Image: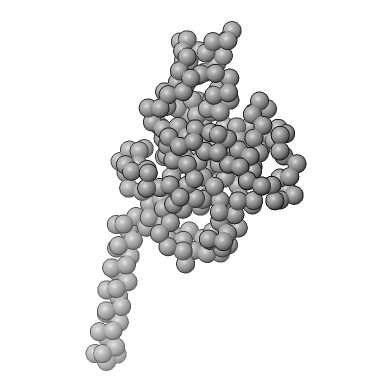
Amino acid sequence: MNKKRYFIFLGLCVVFAFIIISIVYARIDYYIVPTESMLPTIKPGDYILVKEFSRDTDTISNNSLLKNRILVIKRPVTEDTLISKGAELDVFVKRCYGIPGDTVKISRKDLSHKVRNLQGQFNKNIFPHDSTIRWSATQFGPLWVPKKGGKILLNPKNLALYSSIMKYEGNSIIRSSGKYVLNGEYVNHYTFKNNYYFFLGDNFYSSEDSRFWGLVPEINLIGKVIKII
C-alpha cells in the first residue's frame, strides 16, 4: 500500500471511529420500521435514527417540545401489561399527539369500512375498554392526559378512564357504597404520580396506537426520531 492510500485509509478509519464514538456518547440508536402505521411519513423498511432521552429520573425536563414529534416508545398493551412495570413491551414508532395536561379529542369522518360499524357501539378494543364509554377509532374523547401532580375527581367515568393508571402507580382503588377507597382510605380525589402521553400513527385509519392501548407513561418513552433513512 502506497503512502497516499495509507493516509486515505487512515483518514477513513478516524472518521468512522468519530462517528461510532459520537453515536455512543450521544445515545443514538437505529430501528427498522416494519409496518405502514406511519405512512406517508415513514415507509415499511425505512431505517430511523433515534436520539434516546438522557435522564436520571422518570421525568423528561421539557415535555412540551415533544408534541407532534415522532418518538420511539414502549407501549402499554393491556391493563395487565400497563401495571407490570417489568414486562417486555412492544417497541413502536408513533407521533406524540397529547402531552401531560392536554385534553385529546378526535373527531374524523369514518372513511374506512373497517371502522364504519363501530360508531356508538361498545368496542372492547378501544380504550378504555369499558362498556360505559362508547368511543370509537374516529370519535374519541375528550380525554385528559394526566400530568405529574395533577388531580381528578373520583367518579364512575374517571374510574373507568384512569383505574389502570392508578394500579400502575401502585395503588388499590375500589368503589364501595358509592364511595371510593384508595389504599384503605376513603377519598374523593386522586393525584397522579407520573406524566403520561397520547400517541397516534400518521396512517390514521391503519394504526394501532393510544386509541387502542391508552395512555403511555413517560418512562416508556425511548427517544425521538432525528433522521429517516
**Is residue 99 visible to us here?**
yes
- The x, y position of residue 183, in whole percent, is 46, 15
Quarter containing the N terminus: bottom left
Q: Outermost residue toward the bottom?
A: 2
**Is residue 196 visible to us here?**
no
Q: What count of labels does the image hold?
A: 0
Identified at 64% across, 35% down, the residue is: 135
* Placement of 22 over or under 62, stated as above or below: below
Q: Is residue 116 left or right of residue 191?
A: right
Identified at 45% across, 27% down, the residue is: 169
The quarter of the displayed image where residue 124 is located: top right
Q: Is residue 116 left or right of residue 76?
A: right
- The x, y position of residue 114, in whole percent, is 73, 48
Q: Outermost residue toward the top?
A: 177
* Placement of 172 over or under 207, stated as above or below: above
The quarter of the displayed image where residue 122 is located: top right
In the depicted view, which residue is nearer to us: 176 or 104? 104
Q: How is the image coloured?
A: one colour
Identified at 49% across, 50% down, the residue is: 95
- The x, y position of residue 38, in whole percent, is 56, 56
- The x, y position of residue 57, in whole percent, is 33, 38
Identified at 63% across, 39% down, the residue is: 139
In the depicted view, which residue is nearer to us: 81 or 174? 174
* Placement of 162 over or under 67, stated as above or below: above
Q: Is residue 79 left or right of residue 5?
A: right
The quarter of the displayed image where residue 44 is located: bottom right
